[in-house]
Image: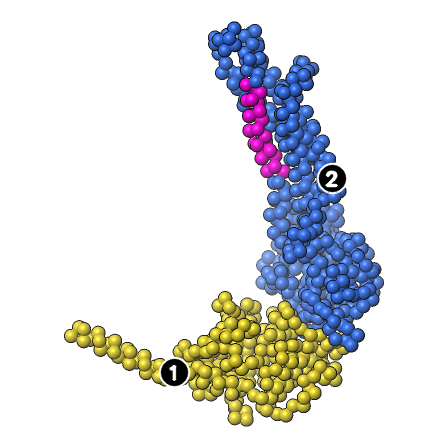
Amino acid sequence: MKYLSIILVVSLSCLTFNLEAQKMPEALEIIEKVDANMVSKTSIVESKMVIQGRRKSRTVVSKGYAEGDKKSFTEYLAPARERGTKMLKLDNKLWIYSPSTDRTIQLSGHMLRQSVMGSDLSYEDMMEDRELTDVYDAKVTGQDTLDGRKTWVLELNAKVDDVSYAKRKMWVDQERFVPLKEDLFAKSGELLKRIILSDFTKTEGRWYPGKINFKDMLKSGKGTDFIVVKIEFDPEILPYIFSKAFLRK
Amino acid sequence: MIQFLLKGILRDKSRSILPIIVVSIGVALTVVLSAYMKGAFGDMIDQNARFKTGHVKIMTKAYAENKAQLPNDLALLEVDKLMESLDKYFPEMEWVNRIRFGGLIDVPDAQGESKGQGPAAGIAINLFDPESGEVQRMNIESSMVKGTMPQQSGEAIIGNDFAEKLNLKIGDEITYFGTTMNGSMTFQNFIVSGTIRFGAAAMDRGAIVVDISDAQKMLDMENGTGELLGFSKLNIYEDEKVKLLADKFNEKYADDPDEFAPIMLPLREQNNLGEMIDYSNYMSVIFIFIFVFAMSIVLWNTGLLGGLRRYQEFGIRLALGEAKGMIYRRLIMEAVLIGMIGSMVGTLIGLAGSYYLQIVGIDISGYMENSTMLMPSVLRAKVTPELFFIGFIPGLLAMVFGNMLSGIGIYKRETASLFKELEV
């Protein structure tokens, strides 16, 4: 009788485990759905970046154009100190144009790891917009509930070397297939950044966050809020926008 | 008696040559090493004070916590009021503003595109007001390799190696790119008025020196400064006095919960210089201890050998009725004379060596290429009055101790067996 009970318990456990395993979708499938939501062929985003410094907060307004993961162009519109500053990313190169000095400077090396305008984002973070499936191997590690929404918990490990974060942990909404939270880790396993996405709206058939909070875990403070004011998916963008000559226009 | 002993020492050279050589070498080494350590540590501390720490430094509490990162967003504001109060309450000190900043120096080509760039290690000081004494304090004029001092706003001095690497000429334009204290991007064009080589690798790498007013404007730090440095008007760092001064200043803000309240750090509490100061003070004592200990053992051994050689002589003197105490005392007096001669010779050699090292120094720049520590590239000795006795007294003592130990054997001689020992 005793052995029968043990066999029964073990069998039930295996059955439960198998059922759970069957319920878990493939990580790749989830990631592809996330990419389908978050990545578009082209996009134009008007946004506000609320930078909460230790002394005071600042809001930087910008308009960004992007084509795939290779080209992007951002023009800063406010405050006055920033107005007219432009950034161009082509492949893995980044140029910044300053109207006050009429100079275009290419950023490279350690400067790419610096904070953008005192925010919790680095230039590298801004440049990194490759599709997750291109950069990471993913596996589903469990389920969780965030703000009342059921999520898949994914662990992503980098499969390429030129990546800012060697490991990511992502909480993906089970219904909308958008990430609700991400923890970004260094190779050493240290938590470097936390991203919390909220205020989702459905635009042109896609769920997209209206607010993204970036928090550099190595700095004190409340982090930086990236607020999407307006977004257009797959608009036509004239090619000259992604040229160095346009920086001076 | 002294004349008699001197004659004995000079005529019986085997009694004096070896101990004199040993004492001379030891004394000379002590003098040279003491002078070198004093000079080297003194230079390091002085250079750190002038370039980085001041005799005291005032920052905000938040800045002080992360000062290695030069967090100008946590800088001191309303500096004029603070300066007024400092001048009033601490008139024995001179106060100067400095801003250190990082970023990028970009050199444009004819089309305005980046021709070359490198990381900037910027320092902003008062270049235009001679009363601030900053130009002299940082040896800027004597460190200039090419060009002239900035004459007006918008001019900068840059590191000579960087200028050569990018083939920059005097009058060329460079662009500084960095972050303001509010986190905004900042771009500023400067005309290169001159190039500089401080001689300290940590300072020369990416150096850009600009006037403080330019930096304040460029970094949105009007009436602000990253660091406020205080220097004694006598230009002498007095550890105790400075500590009291810092305690007095900090007492005022001890209960202030504001993370941007000022805090004063004395030199010894910055860049691990406290350990260096203590080390520098103890160094001579350590040398003397090692010297006296090691030399006493060597000279004890020499005395024992001498004692063996003079075994028969002491035996005869005892047999003739000379008291053991008398022989022992004369042996010690001989040691005093030999010690004095050796110490004088050693001190002279040591002083000559120290003077040579004071003038020529030892070039360590080859070992400092990747160093972030602020150190002079040539370490020099410093000849001070204490060198005249720092080796002399231990030399004398070592010789006397050595002979006192070896001379104890005299008391073990038995008068009854003297004739047997002497085979008379």
Which quadrant, please, contains the N terminus of chain B? top right
Residue A24's label in the rendered image is 1
- Which x, y percent locates residue B336? 64, 22
Which residue is drawn at the image coordinates 69% and 43% (left, top)? B39
Looking at the colours in the rendered structure, which chain would you say is drawn in yellow? A
Give coordinates of residue B385: x percent, y percent.
Answer: 72, 35
Q: Could you say which is closer to the camera, residue A60 or residue B400? A: B400
Residue A120 location, quadrant: bottom right
Q: How many marks?
A: 2
Residue at 81 percent of width and 59 percent of height? B146
| Residue B291 part of the magenta segment | yes
Quick check: is B86 in the magenta stretch?
no
Colour in which chain B is drawn: blue
> Would residue A120 appear left or right of A24 to someone viewing this image?
right
Q: What's the amino acid at mark 2?
A: Tyr
Q: Secondary structure at mark 2?
A: helix
| B327 is higher (above) or lower (below) than B266 | above
Range of magenta residues: B284-308
Q: Which residue is mark 2?
A: B356
Query: How far from the left and from the top, in percent, is residue B411?
Result: 51, 16
Indicate the position of residue B73 as horizontal and vertical percent values. Answer: 65, 67
Name the residue at 62% across, 47% down. Answer: B276
